[in-house]
Amino acid sequence: MIDLRKIKVIVYDCDGVLIDSSLANQAFYSHILGHFGREPLTPEQWEYVKPLSAPDALTWLLQDTPWLAAAQEYQQTVDNTPFLPLLRTEPNLHETLTLLRPHYRLAIATNRGKSLIPVLQHCGLAEFFDFMVTSLDVQHSKPHPECLNRILQHFDVLPGQACYIGDADIDREVSARAGVIFIAYQNPSLQADVHLQNHLDLWRFLKG
């Protein structure tokens, strides 16, 4: 049995947990594909690439094409600003983070890269987090546990003193590999230590 009372650090995934970025990310990938004369992203392609880092997503989308290397360079130069209005903050998130902030250290571990800070600033979330690890900060993206291991080291806590909140199987896997408590957000099909349907559920579980 897990003991939520031992938790000192709460780590969030970004996309699908803090924000609904589906429309923005699909527009981003469709923009890159269109730049190289490809058709827009299909729903089937989106289902596969949505938990991936941008480099990994483009590697899959443009595998066996002559544009992969150029697309990897191009995506680093794309201005994310036009896509920001398509973002939506998850319900009750600000209220929950305000409740948690005095009692826990808050962090982010995400496969998102250079766009993380602009996204957090646009959504009014940057002030809540003590430490963030993006795909640019690690040699190996999720599901490799490097991102969570860095957070554990930064706060000098044991795996059992941290939890990771995610919405995809890749988040379950990275949690298992790092040994931290896994909390699934709005995905009851995932095997998890705790399931949340609303961000405020976390506060209730921790203080219940």
Image: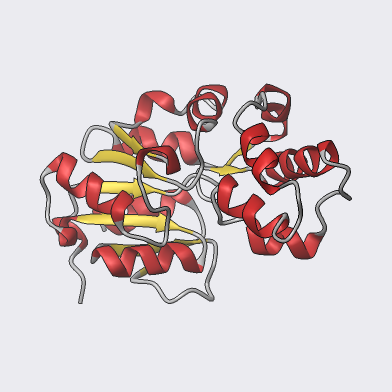
| Residue 90 visible in this rendered orientation of the protein | no
Left or right for 70, reference 118: right
Q: Give me the residue at 12% from left, 50% from top.
A: 157
Left or right for 206, reference 82: left
Position in image of residue 195 (x %, y %): 43, 66
Q: Choose between 89 and 24: the one closer to the eye.
A: 24
Q: Give me the residue at 54% from left, 76% from top.
A: 189
Q: Give me the residue at 42% from left, 26% from top.
A: 126
Position in image of residue 170 (x %, y %): 47, 65
Q: Give me the residue at 72% from left, 34% from top.
A: 86
Q: Give the answer, above or below, for where 24 lies relative to 192.
A: above
| Residue 36 visible in this rendered orientation of the protein | yes
Q: Choose between 55 and 84: the one closer to the eye.
A: 55
Q: Choose between 204 and 69: the one closer to the eye.
A: 69
Left or right for 5, reference 29: left
Count the marks.
0
- For the C terminus, give its image quadrant: bottom left
Position in image of residue 62 (x %, y %): 72, 54
Visual colour scheme: secondary structure
Which residue in the rendered view is the most extreme toward the front?
66
Left or right for 74, reference 176: right
Q: Give the answer, above or below, for where 38 lies relative to 178.
A: above
Position in image of residue 118 (x %, y %): 54, 24
Q: In which quarter of the view is residue 52 placed?
A: bottom right
- For the N terminus, give its image quadrant: bottom left
